[in-house]
Amino acid sequence: MKIGLVRHFKVDIKRNRFMTAKEYNEYQYNYDRANVIKNELIVDSDWDKCYCSSMDRAIITAKTIYHGEIILTDKLVEIPSAAYLDINIKLPYHFWFFLGRLAWALNSAVQPESSNITKKRISEVVDMALKDQEKNVLIVSHAGVMYELRKILLSRGFKGKKFLKANNGSLYVYEKNI
């Protein structure tokens, strides 16, 4: 069995290097609504079915790269992120992102969703994909979700390339003999 992971195409949005908490939250909001820049990836022949995040950037990617059955699900939407501190000081984007992910990992109420809830919903998608063991499944999602998907697949005996942050519009294949 193979499971392929694809991160959505690159998002067409500019980001300031430094931002306040309010600007960070506005950037996150706008990122979720921005268009994508398509690339040439096409993966039709290897996959029997595709699960896809219900966010527009993932749907556009899935419909561009795969022309079979696409199952949309909210369980694959990106891990939401919000500024951890409500301050009006410009700090590096990566600082805000790191604090948000740390708060998420610690299940802080500051974040829109706890890591426990995120991991549960992502694990449910893997369970659905594994029910039909003779099928090869493509999953189109987002960087944070893909990182968690990768960890789940490796823990369930799949083998494949490790990554910290998946490249936009790239395919990562995980295989397991069943």
Image: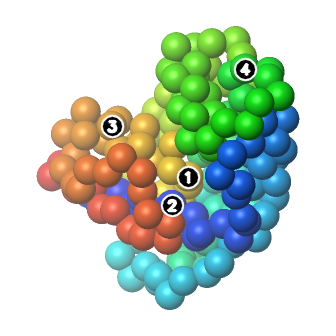
In x, y percent, where is residue 13?
73, 65
Estimate how packed mark 1 is, as few (under 14), some (14 to 19) or many (20 or more) residues with alpha carbons within 10 Å: many
Can you identify the residue that label 4 sits on? 85
Instruction: Determine which of the numbered discs, if any, sits on residue 7 in the image.
Output: 2
Residue at the (57%, 26%) spot, across then down: 99
| Nearer to us: label 4 or label 3 | 4
Tell me where residue 168 appears, x and y as whole percent. Answer: 50, 66
Q: Looking at the image, which is closer to me, 110 or 157?
A: 110
Query: Mark 1 highlights which residue?
Result: 142
Mark 3 → mark 2, Cα distance in angstroms: 15 Å
Q: Is residue 133 left or right of residue 149?
A: left
Q: Residue at x 42, y 56 (%)?
A: 166
Which residue matches tag 3?
151
In the foreground, 20 or 166 = 20
Spatial CA distance of label 1 from label 3 is 14 Å
For marks 2 and 1, the one nearer the N-term is 2
Q: How many marks?
A: 4
Is 21 placed above or below 31 here? Answer: above
